[in-house]
Image: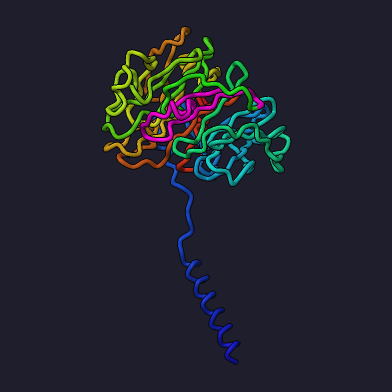
Amino acid sequence: MRRITVVASVLIVVAAIAALYAQQPKSSPPVLRLDTIKLPEGFTISIWAQGVNNARQMAVGSKGTVFVGSLQAGLVHAVVDTDGDHKADKTYVIAKGLGQPSGVAFKDGALYVADISKIYRFDDIEAHLATPPKPVLITSEYPTEGHHGWKFIAFGPDGWLYVPVGAPCNVCDKRGENPVFASVTRIKPDGSGREVWTHGIRNSVGFDWHPITKGLFLTSNGRDMMGDDVPPDTLNYAPKAGMDFGFPYCHAGDVADPEFGSKRQCSEFTKPAQKLGAHVAAIGARFYTGTAFPAEYRNQLFIAEHGSWNRTTPVGYRVTVVTTDAQADVTGYKPFAEGWLQGREAWGRPADVQPLPDGSLLVSDDKSDVIYRISYGR
C-alpha cells in the first residue's frame, strides 16, 4: 500500500509540473518591424527566410542554395527558394554541435565551414542537403582561442581561401607569440600552404575583392575602452601581400594606442581606405556586381554594421554603402538601410550582406533569426 501511495504522489507531482509548464507563455517569434526600415527611393525590403537560428555569414551555391553560418547556435543551415517566389520555403541543417561556425564559403560544389581552429569541407553539398555528407577536415592548425576566434571566410580571385585570425583580446601584442594573430591569412582549397596576407588587423569579419582591380577590401573592428568615439572601425585596402595596418600599436592610421603606441609610430603603417563609425561593428561586406540596382550602386561595397555593445549612445545596426572608383579609391560612405535601431533599443542586427543572382541583396540578422531581401523596383 505504501508503494502505491508513493507512486501516486510522484504522479501527482509530475502532473502538477506539467500543468505549470502548460501555463507558461510559449516563446513567440521576434517582432519584425519592417515598417521602420528606411531605404533609398525605389527599394523595398521583405522577409526572405525566418527561423534561421543566429544567422551570420552567407554563401550562395551554384544551384542557388544559400548557406548560413552561426556564431552562438553551433549550426550551419542551407536555405532554398524552390519555387522562385523570392521567399525561402525549405531550410536544412547541414551541421550542428560546432563551436562558432560563423564562416561559410562555396567553391566547386563544396561548402567550406570555419569553426575557430578548424575548417571543414562538405563535398557535393547541394545534392545532399537532406542527408549531408560527413565533413572533410582540411585544417586544424588555426589558434583555438575563442576571443575573436569566429571567422568570415571567402575565396579570392586567386582561388585561395582567405581566413582572418582576430586578436585574442581587446588589445594585446601577440605577434611574437604567433604571427597569425591579428591578421588575414590565406590557404589553398585543400588546407595547405598557409601564409599571412596582411598584418595589423584587430578583427576582420567581412571582406571582398574590388570588381575591377581585384584588390582586397576588408573591414576591421576597432578596439574598445578608449571612449565612445575613438577609435573608429575601418575599411582597409590590401591589394598585395605583406601590408600592415598597425594593430596593436596604431589604430585607424593615426590613433596611437595608450599601452602599445610607444613601441612603433603610426607613420610606419598603412592608413585605412575609409574610417567608419566608432563601435559600429562593421562586419559582413560584399561588392554589388548585379544590374538590378541603379547604376550608382554597381561595383560598390555594402557593409553590415552589426551595432555597438558598449557605447553610451548605441550606433550601427544598419547597412551602409562605400563607393569606390575604377582605381579602388573610396569616394563616399553613407547609410543604405537603417531602422533596426529605435532610440536605444535594437530589434534586429544586420550580420552579413549577400547579393543574389537575380540582383537582389540578402541581409542576415543574427538577433531576429531572419534573412531579409532588399530589391529595387519590384
Magenta segment's dominant SS is loop
Towards the viewer: 68 or 168: 168
Residue 331 in sight: yes
Q: Residue furthest front?
A: 176
Towards the viewer: 261 or 293: 261
In terms of image quadrants, where is residue 237?
top left
Residue 60 rendering spot, x and y as whole percentages: 61, 29
Drawn side of residue 261 relative to residue 178, left or right: left
Towards the viewer: 224 or 171: 171
Q: At x 37% / y 15%, what residue is drawn?
A: 269
Residue 304 rendering spot, x and y as whole percentages: 44, 29
Towards the viewer: 288 or 292: 288
Q: At x 46% / y 61%, what residue is drawn?
A: 25
Q: At x 42% / y 19%, what residue is drawn?
A: 236
Q: Which residues are magenta?
A: 161-190
Drawn side of residue 262 relative to residue 331, left or right: left
In terms of image quadrants, where is residue 154?
top right
Residue 176 magenta-highlighted: yes
Residue 178 magenta-highlighted: yes
